């Protein structure tokens, strides 16, 4: 008999330990055109993913350019569609970022890695919110490994603590790194406050606005537009297209000298094949939808649904008399903290059995003891969908309470 490889046995044991702690994860297959009315875990906030205009633009892009780019951006893969996308993004953000220019990527994760590793050096300190997305955390860790820069983390949204860290820093270059809309709590960063601190302490703000793009601002530019910022001098934004834009990919939008420097230094941009030009073509249509009247109508509907959901959930929690917390979020992300992993999984499973898909979020994605259901709303939901969801939730919670 063959002996079990000790390294493989170690990995298997670690996997079993995760099962025992109710931390095991597994892939779930999604079928095309599933009932959007029953999915409350998608990031397709404006409901554009199935929009016929986007499908048509993608098909037209494939006919015009083919399916792949054939090379990296700096070799042969930067098509006319990529160039048009970058120029359109720069124009879209021009009111909010001084000298706006854009650099597109295949994923938001790559864009965040590129931004932090491309801008940091040995004379840099990164100041990061403790609830930043994993890609920002990994970007900071990778930047530190490559350059020996310093990394400081401040308690979530504690701007007084951040200011103390900035005051104590003697680094020549300071980067304040944050989410725009925090992906697991749903709250919105105080961007004007961060930019005020950046100006005061000669720092720059690097913001991942994955969950703000399309959902915030009169024309959908996200958190910067939400606060009415004009011509910000010290701001770099990562815009992600796999959420409200209904497509795929991402871009860094920043002052032109920053984008020029990143073109020289950002390894995830330089050393990978460019995304499909067909997707770049579709994204231009998505941007037009988000900026125009249809985008405004969908954002208005989304805000109505957020209000309806919060009122219904708060009424349900009062009825149940359980110590669960609906977090203070004005965004499409509505987290309900239930505490332990097992309860979160049981509630998600009960909702699934009732026909509703809701994510149970557990450590290490969120801190220990704060496992939650992460409800996400989109503009194609109806008020009756929310009512049916909440009825199923109350039934599931009552069943757990009775056990």
Image (spheres, rainbow, N blue to C red):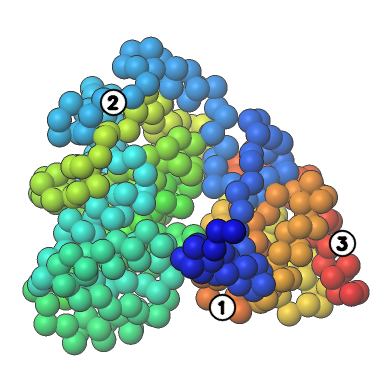
**Can residue 97 be seen?**
no
Q: Position of residue 284 (x, y in %)?
A: 36, 28
- The foreground one among 190 and 323 is 323
Q: Are marks 2 and 3 in contact (CB under 8 Å)?
A: no
At a point 60% along the width and 49% down the height, the residue shown is 27
In front: label 2 or label 3: 2
Mark toward the start of the polypeptide (2 vs 3): 2
Mark toward the start of the polypeptide (1 vs 2): 2
Extreme front residue here? Answer: 1
Extreme top residue here? Answer: 63
Vertical placement of 209 versus 95: above or below? below
- Say left or right for 3 vs 311: left
- Say left or right for 202 vs 325: left
**Residue 64's quadrant in the figure?**
top left
Q: Are marks 3 and 1 in contact (CB under 8 Å)?
A: no
Q: Position of residue 178 (x, y in %)?
A: 35, 65
Circle 3 residue: 395
At a point 43% along the width and 22% down the height, the residue shown is 58
**Residue 151's quadrant in the figure?**
bottom left
**Can residue 143 be seen?**
yes
In front: label 3 or label 1: 1
Mark toward the start of the polypeptide (3 vs 1): 1
Circle 2 residue: 69
- The foreground one among 308 and 335 is 335
State the separation of the CA atoms marked 2 and 3. 50 Å
Vertical placement of 251 versus 83: above or below? below
Circle 1 residue: 368
State the separation of the CA atoms marked 1 and 2. 43 Å
**Residue 360's quadrant in the figure?**
bottom right
How crowded pointer 2 is (Cα within 10 Å; few <14, some 14-19, many 20+) is rated as some
Vertical placement of 243 versus 139: above or below? above
């Amino acid at each position: 008999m063959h002996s079990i490889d000790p390294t493989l046995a170690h990995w298997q044991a670690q996997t079993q330990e995760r099962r025992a702690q109710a931390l095991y994860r597994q892939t779930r297959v999604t079928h095309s055109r599933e009932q959007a009315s029953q999915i409350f875990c998608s990031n397709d906030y404006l409901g554009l993913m199935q929009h016929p205009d986007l499908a048509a633009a993608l098909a037209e892009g494939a006919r015009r350019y083919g399916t792949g780019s054939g090379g990296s951006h700096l070799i042969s893969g930067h098509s006319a569609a990529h160039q048009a996308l970058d120029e359109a993004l720069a124009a879209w953000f021009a009111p909010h970022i001084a000298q706006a220019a854009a650099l597109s990527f295949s994923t938001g994760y790559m864009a965040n890695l590129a931004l932090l590793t491309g801008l940091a050096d040995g004379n840099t300190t990164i100041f990061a919110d403790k609830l930043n997305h994993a890609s920002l955390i990994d970007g900071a860790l990778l930047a530190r490994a490559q350059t020996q820069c310093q990394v400081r983390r401040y308690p979530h949204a504690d701007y007084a603590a951040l200011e103390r860290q900035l005051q104590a820093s003697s680094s020549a270059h300071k980067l304040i790194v944050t989410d725009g809309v925090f992906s697991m709590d749903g709250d919105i960063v105080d961007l004007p406050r961060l930019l005020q601190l950046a100006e005061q302490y000669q720092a720059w703000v690097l913001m991942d606005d994955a969950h703000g793009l399309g959902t915030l601002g009169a024309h959908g530019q996200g958190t910067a537009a939400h606060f009415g910022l004009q011509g910000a001098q010290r701001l770099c934004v990562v815009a992600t297209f796999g959420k409200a834009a209904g497509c795929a990919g991402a871009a860094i939008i920043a002052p032109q000298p920053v984008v020029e420097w990143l073109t020289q230094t950002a390894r995830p941009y330089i050393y990978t094949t460019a995304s499909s030009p067909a997707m770049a073509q579709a994204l231009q249509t998505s941007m037009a939808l988000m900026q125009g009247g249809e985008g405004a109508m969908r954002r208005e509907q989304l805000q109505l649904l957020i209000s309806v959901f919060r009122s219904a959930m708060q009424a349900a929690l009062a009825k149940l008399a359980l110590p669960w917390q609906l977090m203070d979020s004005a965004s499409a992300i509505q987290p309900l903290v239930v505490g332990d992993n097992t309860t979160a999984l049981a509630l998600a499973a009960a909702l699934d059995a009732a026909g509703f898909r809701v994510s149970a979020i557990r450590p290490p994605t969120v801190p220990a003891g704060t496992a939650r259901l992460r409800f996400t709303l989109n503009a194609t939901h109806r008020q009756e969908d929310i009512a049916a969801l909440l009825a199923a939730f109350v039934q599931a919670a009552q069943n757990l309470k009775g056990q």
